[in-house]
Amino acid sequence: MSAEETPQLPKVLIVDDSRMVRASIIKHVRGRFAVREEADGEAGWQALLVDPEIQVVLTDIGMPQLDGYGLLERIRSSKLQRVHEMPVVIISGDEDDDARIKAMQLGANDFITKGIGSVELVARLDSLTHLAQTRRELAESRAALASQSPVDPSSGLLSESYLNWHGEQEMALAKRQRSEISAMVIEIDHYEQLVEWHGAHVAQLITRKLSKILSTRVRKEDTVAQLAPSQFAVLTPSTDVAGCCAFALRLQKAMEKLVMTYREERIRISITIGISGSAVDGLHSVSELIDVAVKRVREGAAAGGNRVVAERGEVDHSMVERQLRQAVSIDHALLQIRAGGEAEVAERLPDVITTLLPLLELVESRLHIGLPIMQLKKYDKERGTGDDVEGSQTSI
């Protein structure tokens, strides 16, 4: 550090409707902390949102616009991690046990009176700014670790960076084999409302439940990653959009019928799924696939959620059935089997049989080897697939 440079002081936000109180506190901390002051809780809240340098908040209780308790509640319910974890000190005119208890229940880090001495005030602020700095460094370390690790430590799923790296390999393989690769982005509907109604902890438990369901339902060759607290991505090599749509509709229906309980409270959720495909959308990279699928999720969410959206808009069962009834490519089916996609081929087995039936009839007419032609013709195209999650109840 050069002689001209000085270390940046940690910034404290002082929120009090009394100019004299603010001036007194500033006098106590001058030289040790940078200060920003606001005269009411609403102005303090706006300052927190726009000033990322603030490390600690000192707030009075009784103020116009928004009182200290209201400001503290907003901070602790914020979805911005920087704001949510902000150390908050409540300032009171006198020792009030009820006020202290309420402040601590709402998440205050400390409770002081306005007559506190300079040495004690500075010591407490030093402790809290060190806590904030440690949290920031820990979050940065976790982010750096997550970017290098193939597994996200919080969700247990593959990380987004690994999804992109591995997905590009799958994309290159699909190009060489002239096969397809598709992407699904799955989002929990009204996630912010879930957080508001049930709390961030319950919302995280619901997210984990969905991640476990996804992990057990996809194939070994599929790649599942978490893009955001309420959003997941699935890359499916050797699978066309029709196959993805069929899977997405089953998953959507299963989540509709799934009832989760938390402390005897019944919680239902729905999901919106956006689907993209390398062939139908003419996409050549994983990032493009994910971006298009995310865009379609947003379209579905804007329309009310609980939807599956593909290149032609919202998808329903009749559309998927029409697509699956179309004659299939036997070459493509064989590629899927070689790539481990037997389940996708099995779903379209009636269509595979329909495509092959003229050839099988010719073989039987010439060789008389006992092929079950009549049984194949009567193959039930309407057989159900079953769903072990539908209508179930689980505790989180």
Image (cartoon, rainbow, N blue to C red):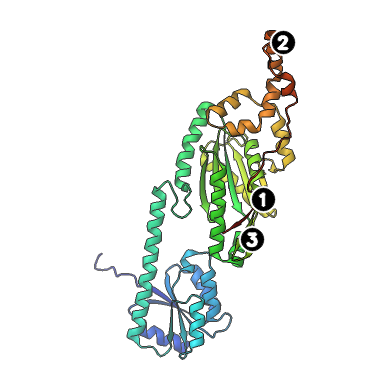
Residues 181 and 39: in front is 181
Q: Amino acid at mark 2?
A: Ser
Tell me what residue is drawn at x 51 percent, y 72 percent. Answer: 75
Helix, strand or loop for disc 3: strand
Judge depth for marks 1 and 2 and give the one in front: 2
Separation of disc 1 and disc 3 at Cα? 22 Å
Tell me what residue is drawn at x 27 percent, y 68 percent. Answer: 4
Q: Is residue 363 above or below residue 235?
A: above
Instruction: Say few, some or many: other residues with alpha carbon within 10 Å of mark 1 (under 14 / 14 to 19 / 20 or more).
Output: many
Separation of disc 1 and disc 2 at Cα? 51 Å
Answer with left or right where residue 356 lies relative to residue 139.
Answer: right
**Count of numbered circles on the image:** 3
From the top left corner, tell me how far across and down residue 96 is, in percent: 48, 89
From the top left corner, tell me how far across and down residue 41 is, in percent: 54, 79
Q: Which mark is residue 4?
A: none
Q: Is residue 376 above or below residue 266?
A: above
Answer with left or right where residue 310 lies relative to residue 202.
Answer: right
Q: Which quadrant would the C terminus be assigned to in this image?
A: bottom right
Answer with left or right where residue 274 lies relative to residue 7.
Answer: right
Residue positioned most to the top:
366
Q: Which mark is residue 365?
A: 2
Instruction: Say few, some or many: other residues with alpha carbon within 10 Å of mark 2 (under 14 / 14 to 19 / 20 or more).
Output: few
Q: Is residue 272 above or below residue 289?
A: below
Q: Earlier in the sequence, mark 1 or mark 3?
A: 3
Tell me what residue is drawn at x 67 percent, y 9 percent. Answer: 367
Q: Amino acid at mark 1?
A: Gly
Q: Earlier in the sequence, mark 3 or mark 2?
A: 3
Answer with left or right where residue 364 lies relative to residue 4.
Answer: right
Residue positioned most to the front:
370
Helix, strand or loop for disc 2: helix
User: Which corner quadrant of the image does residue 238 belong to?
Assistant: top right
Which residue is identified by label 3? 267
